[in-house]
Image (spheres, rainbow, N blue to C red):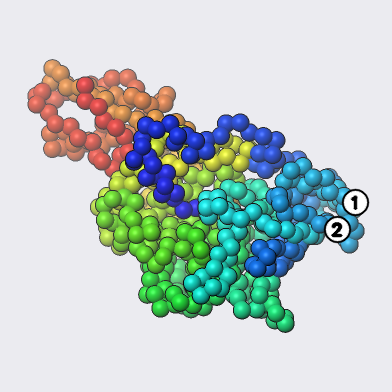
Amino acid sequence: MTYRLFVHIIFLMMPFVSVNAQLLSEKNNFTRQDTLRGSITPERSWWDLTYYHLDIKINPDDKYISGKNTIQYKVLENKNVMQIDLQHPLKIKKVLQNNEELIVKHDGNAHFITLKSNQTVGSLQNIEVYYEGHPKEAVNAPWDGGFSWKKDKNGNHFVATSCQGLGASVWWPNKDHMYDEVDSMLISVNVPKNLVEVSNGRLRKIEEFTDTKTYHWYVANPINNYGVNVNIGDYVHFSEIYDGKNGNLDMDYYVLRDNLKKAKEHFKDAPKMMKAFEHWFGPYPFYKDGFKLVEVPYLGMEHQSSVTYGNNYMKGYLGNDLSGTGWGLKFDFIIIHESGHEWFANNITYKDIADMWIHESFTAYSENLFLDYYYGKKASADYVIGTRNGIANDRPIIGFYNVNNEGSGDMYYKGANMLHTLRQLIEDDEKWRHILRGLNSTFYHQTVTTQQIENYLSKESGIDLTAFFNQYLRTIKIPALEYKIENKQLKYRWTNSVGNFDMPIQVTINEKEQWLFPKADWKTMPLNSNATTLTIDPDFYVYVKKL
Ligand SMILES: [Zn+2]
């Protein structure tokens, strides 16, 4: 998801105003609905998603949708009550299995369906969920998402969905938990004839009717729920073939008619992005589905293989440099950030949104790797260090598990700085690149937990990173290197740190670079004199305190 700039500005302007906590909607009281939405309930765990066919009609004049989702699944355990999610005010009209209507018990946004036929372990089964209604309108897409029903300058409908966090069940019925990705999906959308509809994957066919058209988009790869999207507008299309790591990659662009000329120029950042990220992260993970940029009436989102774009054809983040260094204006923030998510979010996906840092920390970090590729290591370091001004340290990066709760917005730039610090510890950029690529091949098309990522990074780096991740992901404390110089001795230790925190740090003492290995207890190092200057390498995200 896109970094939410207003939080950043508020923190810069009003650091001591207590309203911040409310604005960040910190939540500690969770309801039964949160548990139904956020946990792997018994009514979810017994079946494994294999295929969706979402087949809907969208009427922008009435802001109305209707249709069905056919859900194919493999039976893992012989049970007969299934949870499907669909959010109010949309209504399930009926549910069928083998053409027989089933009984549905509603519990808020969770719907419990009693199946009649025997659910033989290992068998593939289908249910059809019919639904309709006026879906929730997006208040502030993509953060407070739903349907954005907008118009372009020429008065044409310009419609798009966004639903990370909120959940895909805000606009279509599905198993709305991230642990289980569907293996493939067909998205069929009927729209008024004068409009074009763009979803994920490849356009299989267009069916023409008297006043409408149905677009059929096929996704050949596993896809997470919030990645599925519908975009409708007076689109025009252009494309190119990118000579990538895994062969020819189709890169397709859908933009509003009036923007074609500037898009052709501005979207040159897309193949540049592909080149840098294939270098750092390995092959684009969805060659079968191609890559698309699709213009939308909101800022942007990492919809898989149809990354959505609304950055007004400007460099930076709506023309702003999040780092304050100038480097942030060298690229279109949305093209780089949202496409970075193809590796971290769409290829490697969190099982629980509490672990959303896996998406956002690596992707925020990808912004400076893009700079690193084209402008060098110094530019990249300046950028990521510059983004520290947006860190709030208000709440831990990891949220609460099993209740659909995301952690602090610090998952973006505190997370990026944590990874930049880790790069220093690894002290070998080729090894670091190998690790980033290894993450993408090891967890290819998988959903994962923080623990899996931590274990992988510890193993591959050869460093026990347990305390490191406990410090940066699970507390709001930034480690402080405390030191004093007396009697020709340097005394130093870590404070404000978790137990066992013993991160080495690179410092310069009297113009000589060296590593220190501080712990919570004081350590001592002999010096030639008391007239000593000590500076820490600014690449490390720590504080320093001279006593
Ligand atoms: Zn993001």
Where does residue 304 sit, x and y in percent of width and height?
A: 55, 61
Name the mark on residue 97. 2
Tell me the quarter of the image containing the C terminus: top left
Name the mark on residue 295. none
Q: Which residue is mark 1?
A: 116
- Around disc 2, counting alpha carbons within 10 Å, would you say few (fewer than 14), some (14 to 19), or many (20 or more)? some
Where does residue 174 sit, x and y in percent of width and height?
A: 71, 54
Whether residue 225 is visible, yes or no, is yes
Q: Tell me the kind of residue under disc 1.
A: Lys
Q: Report which quarter residue 128 is drawn in.
A: bottom right
Where does residue 5 sit, x and y in percent of width and height?
A: 41, 49
Q: Residue at x 28, y 56 (%)?
A: 327
Query: Quick one: which residue is furthest to the top in this view?
Result: 487
Secondary element at image label 2: strand
**Dot 1 and dot 2 residues touching (CB under 8 Å):** yes
- Around disc 1, counting alpha carbons within 10 Å, would you say few (fewer than 14), some (14 to 19), or many (20 or more)? some
- The one nearer the camera, 292 or 19, is 19
Secondary element at image label 1: loop
Q: How far is the residue under mark 1 from the one under mark 2? A: 8 Å
Q: Tell me the kind of residue under disc 2.
A: Gln
Is 72 drawn above or below residue 432 in the view shown? below
**Is 491 left or right of 55, judged from the image as shown?**
left
Some atom of ligand 1 lies within 8 Å of the CB belonging to the residue at label 1: no
